[in-house]
Amino acid sequence: MERAKIARINELAHKAKTSGLTQAELAERDALRKEYLSNVKASLIDQMEHTTVVEPDGTRHKLLNRS
């Protein structure tokens, strides 16, 4: 996610706490949050798919196997 979008999320969060948001700003905030969460989830899944667990006996297996 671009830095500008993250900055916009933070601007909207600050405005929500101080003066409130319009309906258009609420919709924008919700869309940006949804995109942000989607990116975070995709990143976490990718990280888990590339993690290997090494057991005490030396065997290895992937933490998450999406076959």
Image (spheres, rainbow, N blue to C red):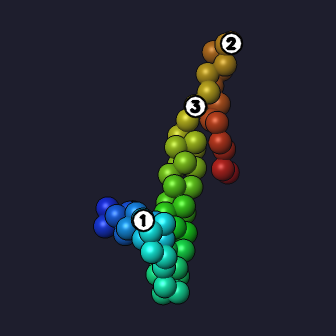
In the foreground, 4 or 21: 21
Question: Mark number for residue 25?
Answer: none
Question: The disc labelled 3 sits on which kind of residue?
Answer: Thr
SS at badge 3: strand
Mark 3 vs mark 2: which is more N-terminal? 3
Position of 10 relative to 57 (above/below): below
- Secondary-structure class at tag 2: loop
Tell me the mark number nearer the camera, choosing from 2 and 1: 1
- The answer, for residue 21, to whether it is visible in the render is yes
Q: Distance from label 2 to label 1 (Cα)? A: 52 Å
Residue at the disc numbered 1: 14
The outermost residue toward the left is 4
Disc number placed over residue 52 in the picture, else none: 3
Residue at image location 57% in from the left, 44% down from the top: 49
Tell me the crowding category of disc 3: few under 14, some 14 to 19, or many 20 or more residues within 10 angstroms, Cα based.
few
The answer to whether residue 32 shows anywhere in this view is no
Q: Residue at x 63, y 15 (%)?
A: 58
Q: Which residue is mark 2?
A: 57
- Answer whether labels 1 and 3 touch (C-beta < 8 Å): no
Query: Tag 2: residue type?
Result: Asp
Is disc 2 in contact with disc 1, using a CB cutoff of under 8 Å? no
Q: What's the residue type where badge 1 is placed? A: His
Residue located at (45% from left, 75% from top): 19
Residue 28 rendering spot, x and y as whole percentages = 47, 79
Q: Secondary structure at mark 1?
A: helix
Which mark's residue is nearer the viewer, 1 or 3? 1
Q: CA distance from mark 1 to mark 3?
A: 40 Å
- 10 Å crowding of disc 1: few (<14), some (14-19), many (20+): few
Are there few (<14), some (14-19), or many (20+) residues within 10 Å of tag 2? few
Residue 35 placed where, x, y %? 50, 68
Q: Name the one closer to the observer, 10 or 47.
A: 10
